[in-house]
Image (cartoon, rainbow, N blue to C red):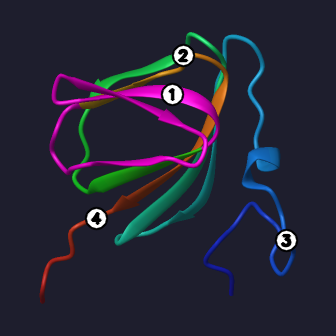
Amino acid sequence: MSFIKNIKHEEVLELADQIHAEKGQIVSKTLAQNKAVSLTLFAFSKGEEIGTHDSQGDAMVTVIEGEGEFTVDATSYVCRAGQSLVMPARKPHSVYAKEDFKMLLTVVFPQTEV
């Protein structure tokens, strides 16, 4: 049973090579998703954006290629390849592609005790 999908296992790979966006596109590829965590690769072409929204979990972006602008609760942050930003749960945030860029989004969701 595999918990991580859509990429090869037991092979060294470049995450940036696993996803591509043509002009005017945002492309996503889900690598894992369950009640606790979500891992998704995104590729944005320059000028594309994901409008303001929030999440029930903490969202951490890691830029793997290019540069993106992230607005969290009205504060803007620019992240370049190799940099990460945590966007806290329930805070409004958005993403804008200042140039073509790729990122890995990790969302960790709250777990309720039973």
Residue corresponding to mark 3: 12
Q: Which of marks 1 and 4 is nearer the N terminus?
A: 1
Q: Does the magenta stretch include residue 88?
A: yes
Q: What element carries label 1?
A: strand
Residue corresponding to mark 4: 109
> Where, by quadrant of the figure, is residue 11 drawn?
bottom right
Spatial CA span between label 3 and label 1: 26 Å
> Where, by quadrant of the figure, is residue 114 drawn?
bottom left
Residue corresponding to mark 1: 68
Q: Is mark 2 on a helix, strand or loop?
A: loop
Q: Which of marks 3 and 4 is nearer the N terminus?
A: 3
Spatial CA span between label 2 and label 3: 29 Å
Spatial CA span between label 2 and label 1: 6 Å
Q: Is residue 21 left or right of residue 101?
A: right
- Within 10 Å of the Cα at label 3, are there few (<14), some (14-19), or many (20+) other Cα atoms? few
Kindly check if marks 2 and 1 are in contact, taking CB atoms under 8 A apart as contact: yes
Q: Which residue is drawn at 52% across and 59% down?
A: 39
Label annotation for residue 105 = none
Residue corresponding to mark 2: 98
Q: Which of 78 and 51 is in front in this view?
A: 78
Q: Which of marks 2 and 1 is nearer the N terminus?
A: 1
- Within 10 Å of the Cα at label 2, are there few (<14), some (14-19), or many (20+) other Cα atoms? some
Spatial CA span between label 1 and label 4: 24 Å
User: What is the x, y in percent for residue 4?
Assistant: 64, 72
Q: What residue type is labelled 4?
A: Phe
